């Protein structure tokens, strides 16, 4: 659809307005879906032509679109996707549009510009500033930057970079702004697949060729070759001339994956995540829209890229909680992938060794197809899993490695094999206690205890990130020298391991110990090459890294996740423990996983050990069904927050009293109650929970329920449909 110059068009902008605005089409007219720049008050803002003008505004006051941007117009299916995603998550459209335009400089015309990359030789004189520039360039191996970007990343002025250009150490080049991505060749020979893998790949290829929507749950133990199999589905999409998107839960996993893609298809795909440079993000956004990027590997927000013909979406480690975005727009990338695919006739592959109960249930109900890979590739076998009953172990106070676990680690050290000690807690100690008055040091702004980080020599709040130096004296009673750490974090465990196993090489892997994703990646590679005897890690290590020489996993506190009030506590513990255990024995050496626990007879622990996954899912499903909770019922979390607790509660009570729209659909509302974390960043938080029968139109009811609310002052309301974490 085309609008001629002067015709009225409705433009959706990224500004927080509750409606589209009318403008006159510019000289030359514009197409439906065109990205445009429009005047709004004194500013120019980005928008998309959403339809014909509404015409409910004084025509003489209507201004003209300033210009149409030189990018492919938003496709019909993308507009539909944003609309449906907005309806599903109860998000205003401008916020959805912001998600879909997260690339800088979209409107800049295509032209040449100068880029800077590593040259050769060393400068005559090395300064700190110069060294930083070179470090950035080396860190990003081979990538080029704009002058501004490079100077900013190195924290230097642009003259420092220019100085290095004169010396030849940095090279300046002319480059067209955005280059297409190198061609990926699906017909290069892949690895020879096993019969199981071949069967799964054939099924997926056939599904793709159907050219219609469908979702497949690809379940396979860690190391069974799920990645090899879904790469064949990617190949099929590429052969059909359609694009493929692979979502990964963790940037640190991308490097290994990119190498595998390059081996399979002869070139690297486009990368989309927060670690990519602005220049690179812009290039991805444009090339995806033009069809000059066949494949994208990325984080959840890659779902909102303007694909020209998306044929396949893979959600790897689909159970991973990081697919749920919990700030801004609350969405689950796994569910949105299914939504997007249904709109554009694409296939979805959800890959996991330990699927979410939602996906498992959808497969049971026949909504998803299911493929299973049951054995590990090659000689690798699943680890032998056992518990260590902590009630029977003789523990020194302030230690967490039991004698049984110690022996097992010692045996690995003697054989020259690696062990992993897993503890899902960052920092040194979760609690700092005053032995004089009993005070536990808490954050000034949040209802949370400060966690000691000895590595940083500070206390840190894991809610708001606030840090402060470790005090000498108790902030409550003023007594000096009585503050003591309570409980273990990864840093404290490392200290214990160093004392217990002298003369061994110990490596810590925790997201906060590395300045950049790159540094973390380098560390992971070092460990994989055998550069550590003992690895001490948090949740980070559970996610798909390959350590071929690792044969023992010791879980320090298997009970940690069992007690939460979260309805997914059992599911999460089950997934995490099985994922962590899956790190052992990936190559030709069999592995063992030892779980330290105080309740070896707990049903979840027993299910983890027995490996009866189907049995676990069935029991868990029955429990949820009886309670009417997801996936057998629907839930939404409403969080109200504000600087004063009273007014926030008042609003909560008003909502609870006026629950007619909810009752009409058979839903119940619980609360208001203080949220589990009752204060974050100085804001008091009050929560209501809505529970509805499966299939009830919960979004519509909630929209009608909150619509009459007029929030005064600084009170904010957020709606989280299908909440994953209850905080
Ligand atoms: P998953 O994704 O299920 O964890 P991967 O696809 O990463 O499994 O496979 C685990 C390891 O086994 C990888 O190093 C992979 O290259 C190797 N592998 C799997 N299948 C094959 C095969 N058919 N031929 C050669 N290597 C394979
Ligand atoms: Zn805080």
Image (spheres, grey):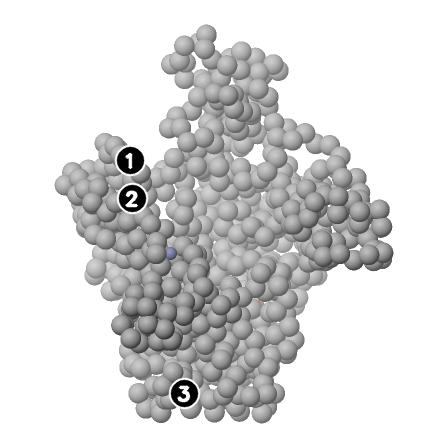
Ligand 1 has an atom within 8 Å of the beta carbon of the residue at disc 3: no
Residue 402, disc? 3
In the rendered image, which quarter contains the C terminus?
A: bottom left
Note whether 407 is above or below 447 in the view shown: below
Q: Secondary structure at mark 1?
A: loop
Task: Give the alpha-carbon distance from disc 3 to disc 2, as whole Å.
Answer: 46 Å
Of the image marks 2 and 1, the number of the one nearer the N terminus: 2
Neighbour class for label 1 at 10 Å: few (<14), some, many (≥20)? few
Expressed as whole percent of the image width and height from the top left, the position of residue 43 reads 52, 24
Residue found 28% across the figure and 61% down from its top: 567
Expressed as whole percent of the image width and height from the top left, the position of residue 308 reads 58, 38
Q: Are marks 2 and 1 in contact (CB under 8 Å)?
A: yes
Expressed as whole percent of the image width and height from the top left, the position of residue 403 reads 42, 91
Q: Is residue 130 left or right of residue 237?
A: right
Residue found 42% across the figure and 24% down from its top: 20
Q: Secondary structure at mark 2?
A: strand
Q: Nearer the viewer, residue 139 or 267?
A: 139
Residue 713, disc? 1
Residue at which label 2 appears: 642
Q: Looking at the image, is mark 3 or mark 2 nearer the viewer?
A: 2
Q: Are marks 3 and 1 in contact (CB under 8 Å)?
A: no
Task: Give the alpha-carbon distance from disc 3 to disc 1, as whole Å.
Answer: 54 Å
Q: Is residue 396 left or right of residue 196?
A: left
Expressed as whole percent of the image width and height from the top left, the position of residue 293 reads 65, 44
């Amino acid at each position: 659809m085309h609008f001629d110059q002067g015709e009225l068009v409705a433009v959706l902008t990224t500004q927080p307005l509750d409606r589209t605005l009318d403008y006159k089409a510019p000289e030359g007219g514009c197409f439906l879906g065109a990205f445009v720049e429009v005047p709004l008050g004194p500013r120019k803002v980005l928008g998309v032509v959403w339809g014909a003008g509404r015409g409910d505004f004084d025509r003489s006051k209507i201004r003209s679109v300033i210009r149409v941007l030189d990018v492919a117009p938003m496709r019909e299916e993308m507009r539909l996707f944003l609309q449906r995603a907005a309806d599903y998550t109860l998000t205003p459209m401008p916020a959805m549009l912001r998600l879909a335009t997260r690339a800088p400089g979209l409107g800049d015309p295509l032209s040449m510009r100068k880029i800077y990359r590593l040259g050769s030789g060393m400068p005559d004189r090395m300064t700190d500033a110069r060294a930083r520039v070179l470090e950035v360039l080396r860190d990003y191996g081979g990538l080029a930057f704009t002058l501004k970007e490079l100077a900013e990343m190195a924290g230097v002025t642009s003259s420092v970079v220019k100085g290095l250009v004169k010396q030849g150490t940095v090279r300046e080049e002319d480059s067209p702004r955005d280059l297409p991505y190198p061609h990926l060749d699906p017909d290069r020979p892949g690895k020879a697949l096993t019969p199981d893998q071949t069967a799964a790949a054939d099924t997926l290829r056939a599904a793709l060729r159907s050219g219609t929507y469908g979702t497949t749950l690809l379940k396979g133990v860690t190391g069974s070759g799920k990645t090899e199999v879904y790469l064949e589905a990617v190949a099929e999409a590429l052969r059909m001339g359609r694009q493929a998107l692979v979502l990964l839960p963790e940037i640190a996993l991308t490097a290994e994956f990119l190498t595998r893609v390059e081996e399979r298809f002869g070139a690297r795909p486009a990368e989309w995540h927060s670690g990519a440079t602005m220049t690179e993000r812009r290039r991805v956004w444009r090339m995806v829209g033009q069809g000059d990027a066949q494949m994208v590997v990325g984080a959840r927000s890659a779902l909102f890229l303007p694909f020209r013909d998306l044929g396949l979406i893979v959600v790897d480690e689909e159970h991973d909680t990081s697919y749920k975005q919990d700030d801004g727009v609350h969405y689950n990338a796994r569910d949105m992938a299914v939504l997007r695919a249904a709109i554009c006739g694409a296939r979805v592959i959800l890959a996991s060794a330990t699927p979410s109960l939602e996906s498992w249930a959808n497969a049971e109900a026949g909504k998803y197809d299911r493929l299973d890979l049951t054995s590990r590739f090659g000689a690798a076998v699943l680890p032998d899993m056992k518990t260590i009953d902590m009630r029977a172990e003789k523990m020194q106070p302030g230690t967490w490695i039991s004698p049984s676990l110690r022996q097992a680690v010692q045996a690995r050290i003697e054989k020259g094999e690696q062990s992993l000690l897993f503890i899902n807690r960052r920092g040194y100690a979760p609690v700092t206690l005053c032995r004089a008055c009993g005070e536990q040091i808490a954050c000034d702004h949040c209802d949370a205890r400060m966690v000691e980080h000895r590595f940083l020599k500070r206390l840190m709040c894991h809610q708001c990130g606030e840090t402060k130096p470790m005090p000498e004296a108790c902030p409550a009673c003023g007594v000096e020298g009585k503050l003591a750490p309570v409980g273990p974090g990864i840093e404290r465990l490392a200290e214990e391991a160093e004392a217990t196993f002298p003369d061994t090489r110990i490596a810590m892997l925790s997201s906060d110990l590395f300045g950049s994703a790159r540094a973390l990646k380098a560390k992971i590679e070092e460990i994989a090459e055998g550069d550590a005897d003992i690895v001490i890690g948090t949740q980070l290590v559970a996610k798909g890294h390959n350590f071929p020489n690792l044969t023992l996993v010791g879980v320090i506190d298997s009970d940690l996740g069992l007690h939460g009030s979260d309805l997914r506590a059992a599911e999460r513990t089950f997934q995490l423990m099985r994922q962590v255990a899956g790190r052992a024995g990936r190559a030709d050496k069999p592995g063992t996983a030892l779980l330290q626990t105080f309740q070896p007879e707990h049903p979840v622990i027993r299910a983890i050990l027995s490996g009866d996954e189907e049995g676990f899912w069935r029991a868990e499903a029955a429990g949820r069904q009886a309670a009417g909770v997801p996936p057998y019922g629907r839930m939404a979390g409403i969080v109200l927050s504000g600087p004063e607790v009273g007014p926030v509660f008042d609003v909560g009570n008003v909502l609870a009293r006026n629950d007619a729209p909810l009752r009409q659909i058979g839903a119940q509302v619980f609360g208001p109650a203080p949220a589990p974390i009752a204060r974050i960043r100085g804001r008091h938080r009050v929560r209501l929970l809505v529970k509805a029968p499966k299939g009830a139109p919960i979004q519509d009811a909630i929209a009608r329920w909150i619509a009459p609310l007029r929030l005064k002052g600084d009170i904010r309301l957020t709606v989280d449909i299908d909440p994953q974490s209850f905080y």
